[in-house]
Image (cartoon, helix red, strand yellow):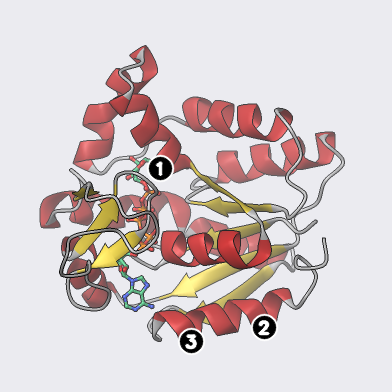
Amino acid sequence: MTNIILLGPPGAGKGTQAKRLVEERGMVQLSTGDMLREARSSGTEMGQRVAAVMDRGELVTDEIVIGLIREKLTSGAAHGGYIFDGFPRTLAQADALGALLSELGQSLDHVIEMRVDDEVLVARITGRSTCGNCGEVYHDVTRPVPADGKCVNCGSTEIKRRADDNEDALRTRLLAYYKQTSPLIGYYHAKGQLESVNGLAAIEAVAAEISGLLGSQTQDA
Ligand code: AP5
Protein backbone atom coordinates (compact mmCIF):
# COMPACT_ATOMS: atom_id res chain seq x y z
CA MET A 1 0.00 0.00 0.00
CA THR A 2 1.42 3.35 -1.08
CA ASN A 3 0.06 6.72 0.03
CA ILE A 4 1.00 9.80 -1.97
CA ILE A 5 0.34 13.54 -2.05
CA LEU A 6 0.06 15.40 -5.37
CA LEU A 7 1.06 18.98 -4.59
CA GLY A 8 0.74 21.93 -6.96
CA PRO A 9 -1.17 25.11 -7.81
CA PRO A 10 -4.66 25.14 -9.37
CA GLY A 11 -4.40 23.68 -12.87
CA ALA A 12 -1.09 21.89 -12.24
CA GLY A 13 -2.75 18.63 -13.33
CA LYS A 14 -3.29 16.94 -9.94
CA GLY A 15 -6.78 15.68 -10.75
CA THR A 16 -5.80 14.53 -14.25
CA GLN A 17 -2.89 12.44 -12.93
CA ALA A 18 -4.85 11.18 -9.92
CA LYS A 19 -7.55 9.76 -12.21
CA ARG A 20 -4.89 7.86 -14.19
CA LEU A 21 -3.36 6.41 -11.02
CA VAL A 22 -6.82 5.21 -9.95
CA GLU A 23 -7.30 3.43 -13.28
CA GLU A 24 -3.78 2.08 -13.66
CA ARG A 25 -2.90 1.17 -10.07
CA GLY A 26 -6.19 0.75 -8.24
CA MET A 27 -5.38 3.60 -5.88
CA VAL A 28 -8.11 5.68 -4.21
CA GLN A 29 -8.28 9.41 -5.02
CA LEU A 30 -9.12 11.64 -2.07
CA SER A 31 -9.80 15.09 -3.52
CA THR A 32 -11.02 17.56 -0.90
CA GLY A 33 -12.18 19.84 -3.76
CA ASP A 34 -14.43 17.03 -5.10
CA MET A 35 -15.72 16.25 -1.60
CA LEU A 36 -16.60 19.90 -1.00
CA ARG A 37 -18.31 20.22 -4.41
CA GLU A 38 -20.30 17.07 -3.63
CA ALA A 39 -21.36 18.55 -0.28
CA ARG A 40 -22.51 21.79 -1.91
CA SER A 41 -24.45 20.08 -4.69
CA SER A 42 -26.20 17.78 -2.23
CA GLY A 43 -27.25 20.92 -0.31
CA THR A 44 -25.90 19.91 3.12
CA GLU A 45 -25.54 22.68 5.69
CA MET A 46 -21.75 22.45 5.43
CA GLY A 47 -22.00 22.56 1.61
CA GLN A 48 -23.99 25.78 1.76
CA ARG A 49 -21.48 27.31 4.16
CA VAL A 50 -18.48 26.60 1.90
CA ALA A 51 -20.06 27.44 -1.48
CA ALA A 52 -19.32 31.19 -1.45
CA VAL A 53 -15.79 30.64 -0.08
CA MET A 54 -15.00 28.22 -2.92
CA ASP A 55 -16.48 30.46 -5.60
CA ARG A 56 -14.23 33.31 -4.42
CA GLY A 57 -11.22 30.97 -4.60
CA GLU A 58 -10.39 31.16 -0.89
CA LEU A 59 -9.56 28.20 1.33
CA VAL A 60 -12.22 26.45 3.38
CA THR A 61 -11.38 26.09 7.10
CA ASP A 62 -8.86 23.46 8.21
CA GLU A 63 -11.44 22.02 10.59
CA ILE A 64 -13.86 21.15 7.77
CA VAL A 65 -11.35 19.58 5.38
CA ILE A 66 -9.48 17.66 8.07
CA GLY A 67 -12.86 16.30 9.20
CA LEU A 68 -13.64 15.14 5.64
CA ILE A 69 -10.29 13.37 5.29
CA ARG A 70 -10.57 11.79 8.74
CA GLU A 71 -13.98 10.39 7.82
CA LYS A 72 -12.64 8.80 4.60
CA LEU A 73 -9.49 7.35 6.16
CA THR A 74 -11.28 5.82 9.12
CA SER A 75 -14.11 4.31 7.08
CA GLY A 76 -12.05 1.52 5.47
CA ALA A 77 -8.65 0.67 4.00
CA ALA A 78 -7.65 1.34 0.38
CA HIS A 79 -5.45 -1.59 -0.57
CA GLY A 80 -3.88 0.21 -3.54
CA GLY A 81 -3.16 3.25 -1.34
CA TYR A 82 -4.47 6.82 -1.25
CA ILE A 83 -3.75 9.76 -3.55
CA PHE A 84 -4.23 12.99 -1.61
CA ASP A 85 -5.26 15.52 -4.28
CA GLY A 86 -5.60 19.13 -3.08
CA PHE A 87 -4.93 18.11 0.52
CA PRO A 88 -3.03 19.12 2.60
CA ARG A 89 -3.10 22.81 1.69
CA THR A 90 -1.88 24.37 4.96
CA LEU A 91 0.76 23.43 7.51
CA ALA A 92 -2.00 22.60 10.01
CA GLN A 93 -3.53 20.18 7.48
CA ALA A 94 -0.11 18.60 6.84
CA ASP A 95 0.42 18.03 10.56
CA ALA A 96 -3.09 16.61 10.91
CA LEU A 97 -2.52 14.20 8.00
CA GLY A 98 0.75 12.96 9.52
CA ALA A 99 -0.94 12.38 12.87
CA LEU A 100 -3.93 10.65 11.29
CA LEU A 101 -1.79 8.28 9.20
CA SER A 102 0.35 7.29 12.16
CA GLU A 103 -2.79 6.77 14.28
CA LEU A 104 -3.93 4.31 11.58
CA GLY A 105 -0.52 2.62 11.34
CA GLN A 106 0.02 3.96 7.82
CA SER A 107 2.79 5.97 6.20
CA LEU A 108 3.14 8.78 3.69
CA ASP A 109 5.34 7.35 0.93
CA HIS A 110 5.68 10.08 -1.72
CA VAL A 111 5.04 13.82 -1.83
CA ILE A 112 5.11 14.76 -5.51
CA GLU A 113 5.31 18.43 -6.41
CA MET A 114 3.97 19.22 -9.90
CA ARG A 115 6.05 22.18 -11.08
CA VAL A 116 4.37 24.58 -13.54
CA ASP A 117 4.57 28.25 -14.57
CA ASP A 118 1.73 30.61 -13.66
CA GLU A 119 1.30 31.67 -17.32
CA VAL A 120 0.00 28.26 -18.40
CA LEU A 121 -2.48 28.03 -15.53
CA VAL A 122 -4.95 30.65 -16.83
CA ALA A 123 -5.23 28.83 -20.17
CA ARG A 124 -5.58 25.45 -18.46
CA ILE A 125 -8.21 26.60 -15.97
CA THR A 126 -10.37 28.67 -18.32
CA GLY A 127 -10.37 25.82 -20.89
CA ARG A 128 -11.28 23.08 -18.44
CA SER A 129 -14.50 21.08 -18.33
CA THR A 130 -15.37 17.98 -16.32
CA CYS A 131 -17.82 15.10 -16.69
CA GLY A 132 -20.54 15.63 -14.08
CA ASN A 133 -21.09 11.89 -13.85
CA CYS A 134 -17.60 10.35 -13.52
CA GLY A 135 -15.27 13.36 -13.06
CA GLU A 136 -13.23 12.80 -16.26
CA VAL A 137 -11.25 16.00 -16.95
CA TYR A 138 -11.18 17.71 -20.39
CA HIS A 139 -9.61 20.79 -21.93
CA ASP A 140 -10.94 22.76 -24.91
CA VAL A 141 -7.56 22.58 -26.68
CA THR A 142 -5.40 19.81 -25.21
CA ARG A 143 -8.08 17.21 -24.41
CA PRO A 144 -11.38 18.16 -26.05
CA VAL A 145 -14.71 16.47 -25.37
CA PRO A 146 -15.51 14.18 -28.37
CA ALA A 147 -17.65 15.73 -31.15
CA ASP A 148 -20.73 13.72 -30.05
CA GLY A 149 -20.51 15.48 -26.64
CA LYS A 150 -20.21 12.16 -24.77
CA CYS A 151 -17.67 11.48 -22.04
CA VAL A 152 -15.00 9.01 -23.24
CA ASN A 153 -15.11 7.24 -19.91
CA CYS A 154 -18.82 6.83 -19.11
CA GLY A 155 -20.78 8.14 -22.12
CA SER A 156 -22.56 10.85 -20.11
CA THR A 157 -23.36 14.14 -21.88
CA GLU A 158 -23.32 16.05 -18.58
CA ILE A 159 -20.10 18.01 -19.21
CA LYS A 160 -19.74 20.98 -16.83
CA ARG A 161 -17.54 23.99 -16.10
CA ARG A 162 -16.63 24.89 -12.51
CA ALA A 163 -17.95 28.11 -10.94
CA ASP A 164 -14.44 29.03 -9.73
CA ASP A 165 -12.78 28.50 -13.13
CA ASN A 166 -12.62 32.17 -14.11
CA GLU A 167 -9.72 34.64 -14.07
CA ASP A 168 -10.83 36.54 -10.93
CA ALA A 169 -11.25 33.43 -8.77
CA LEU A 170 -8.05 31.95 -10.21
CA ARG A 171 -6.09 35.01 -9.04
CA THR A 172 -7.40 34.46 -5.49
CA ARG A 173 -6.71 30.70 -5.72
CA LEU A 174 -3.13 31.37 -6.82
CA LEU A 175 -2.62 33.85 -3.99
CA ALA A 176 -3.95 31.28 -1.51
CA TYR A 177 -1.57 28.71 -3.01
CA TYR A 178 1.53 30.89 -2.64
CA LYS A 179 0.58 32.20 0.80
CA GLN A 180 -0.81 29.09 2.50
CA THR A 181 0.15 25.99 0.47
CA SER A 182 3.60 26.59 -1.03
CA PRO A 183 5.25 26.51 2.47
CA LEU A 184 4.48 22.78 2.34
CA ILE A 185 7.22 22.40 -0.28
CA GLY A 186 9.81 23.43 2.34
CA TYR A 187 8.04 21.39 5.03
CA TYR A 188 8.21 18.11 3.07
CA HIS A 189 11.68 18.91 1.70
CA ALA A 190 12.93 19.26 5.28
CA LYS A 191 11.37 15.88 6.08
CA GLY A 192 13.22 14.36 3.10
CA GLN A 193 9.96 13.41 1.40
CA LEU A 194 9.69 15.88 -1.48
CA GLU A 195 10.00 14.77 -5.11
CA SER A 196 9.22 16.87 -8.18
CA VAL A 197 7.95 16.33 -11.72
CA ASN A 198 7.71 18.70 -14.68
CA GLY A 199 4.00 19.54 -14.81
CA LEU A 200 4.51 21.54 -18.01
CA ALA A 201 5.17 18.40 -20.04
CA ALA A 202 2.40 16.61 -21.94
CA ILE A 203 -0.09 14.61 -19.83
CA GLU A 204 1.45 11.25 -20.90
CA ALA A 205 4.99 12.44 -20.11
CA VAL A 206 3.95 13.68 -16.64
CA ALA A 207 2.26 10.32 -16.02
CA ALA A 208 5.45 8.48 -17.03
CA GLU A 209 7.55 10.63 -14.68
CA ILE A 210 5.19 9.96 -11.75
CA SER A 211 5.17 6.28 -12.59
CA GLY A 212 8.96 6.28 -12.48
CA LEU A 213 8.88 7.72 -8.97
CA LEU A 214 6.31 5.21 -7.74
CA GLY A 215 7.93 2.18 -9.36
CA SER A 216 5.89 -1.00 -9.34
CA GLN A 217 5.03 -0.95 -5.64
CA THR A 218 1.35 0.06 -5.82
CA GLN A 219 0.65 -2.32 -8.71
CA ASP A 220 1.74 -5.21 -6.53
CA ALA A 221 -0.38 -4.15 -3.56
P1 AP5 B 1 -9.64 21.90 -5.91
O1 AP5 B 1 -10.79 21.24 -6.51
O2 AP5 B 1 -8.64 21.10 -5.15
O3 AP5 B 1 -8.95 22.77 -7.02
P2 AP5 B 1 -7.40 23.21 -7.26
O4 AP5 B 1 -6.40 22.80 -6.29
O5 AP5 B 1 -7.52 24.67 -7.50
O6 AP5 B 1 -6.96 22.39 -8.42
P3 AP5 B 1 -7.70 22.17 -9.74
O7 AP5 B 1 -8.70 21.07 -9.61
O8 AP5 B 1 -8.21 23.48 -10.28
O9 AP5 B 1 -6.49 21.77 -10.69
P4 AP5 B 1 -5.72 20.39 -10.91
O10 AP5 B 1 -4.32 20.55 -10.47
O11 AP5 B 1 -6.49 19.22 -10.38
O12 AP5 B 1 -5.72 20.39 -12.50
P5 AP5 B 1 -6.51 19.45 -13.55
O13 AP5 B 1 -5.93 18.09 -13.53
O14 AP5 B 1 -8.00 19.58 -13.41
O15 AP5 B 1 -10.14 23.05 -4.89
C1 AP5 B 1 -11.20 23.91 -5.20
C2 AP5 B 1 -11.54 24.76 -3.99
O16 AP5 B 1 -11.99 23.90 -2.90
C3 AP5 B 1 -10.38 25.56 -3.38
O17 AP5 B 1 -10.19 26.80 -4.04
C4 AP5 B 1 -10.88 25.73 -1.93
O18 AP5 B 1 -11.88 26.71 -1.82
C5 AP5 B 1 -11.52 24.39 -1.64
N1 AP5 B 1 -10.57 23.39 -1.07
C6 AP5 B 1 -10.23 22.19 -1.65
N2 AP5 B 1 -9.35 21.53 -0.89
C7 AP5 B 1 -9.12 22.31 0.20
C8 AP5 B 1 -8.27 22.17 1.34
N3 AP5 B 1 -7.49 21.09 1.51
N4 AP5 B 1 -8.28 23.18 2.25
C9 AP5 B 1 -9.06 24.26 2.11
N5 AP5 B 1 -9.88 24.46 1.05
C10 AP5 B 1 -9.90 23.49 0.09
O19 AP5 B 1 -6.04 20.17 -14.91
C11 AP5 B 1 -6.49 21.47 -15.26
C12 AP5 B 1 -6.69 21.55 -16.79
O20 AP5 B 1 -5.42 21.41 -17.44
C13 AP5 B 1 -7.58 20.42 -17.35
O21 AP5 B 1 -8.40 20.96 -18.37
C14 AP5 B 1 -6.58 19.39 -17.91
O22 AP5 B 1 -7.11 18.69 -19.02
C15 AP5 B 1 -5.40 20.28 -18.31
N6 AP5 B 1 -4.10 19.60 -18.11
C16 AP5 B 1 -3.73 18.86 -17.03
N7 AP5 B 1 -2.46 18.42 -17.17
C17 AP5 B 1 -2.01 18.93 -18.36
C18 AP5 B 1 -0.77 18.83 -19.07
N8 AP5 B 1 0.27 18.15 -18.56
N9 AP5 B 1 -0.68 19.48 -20.26
C19 AP5 B 1 -1.72 20.19 -20.78
N10 AP5 B 1 -2.93 20.29 -20.16
C20 AP5 B 1 -3.07 19.69 -18.96
- For image coordinates 53% across by 69% down, the residue present is 113
Q: CA distance from mark 3 to mark 1?
A: 25 Å
Q: Is mark 3 within 8 Å of ligand 1?
A: yes
Q: What is the x, y in percent for residue 183?
A: 51, 57
Q: Is residue 99 visible?
A: yes
- Name the residue that disc number 2 marks: 212
Count the labels in the image: 3
Q: Is mark 1 within 8 Å of ligand 1?
A: yes
Q: Quick check: marks 1 and 2 in contact, CB under 8 Å?
A: no
Q: Quick check: marks 2 and 3 in contact, CB under 8 Å?
A: no
Q: CA distance from mark 1 to mark 2?
A: 27 Å
Q: Residue furthest right?
A: 105
Q: What is the x, y in percent for residue 119?
A: 22, 76
Q: Quick check: marks 3 and 1 in contact, CB under 8 Å?
A: no
The correct choice, above or below, for 1 with respect to 143 in the image is above
- For image coordinates 60% across by 58% down, the residue present is 5
Q: Amino acid at mark 2?
A: Gly
- Name the residue that disc number 3 marks: 205
Q: Point out the tag, 2 or 3, that comes first from the N-terminus.
A: 3
The correct choice, above or below, for 139 with respect to 154 in the image is below
Q: CA distance from mark 2 to mark 3?
A: 11 Å
Q: Amino acid at mark 1?
A: Gly
How many residues crowd mark 1 within 10 Å: few (<14), some (14–19), many (20+)? some
- For image coordinates 82% across by 34% down, the residue present is 103
Point out the quarter of the image occupied by ligand 1. bottom left
| Residue 15 or residue 152, whichever sits in front | 152
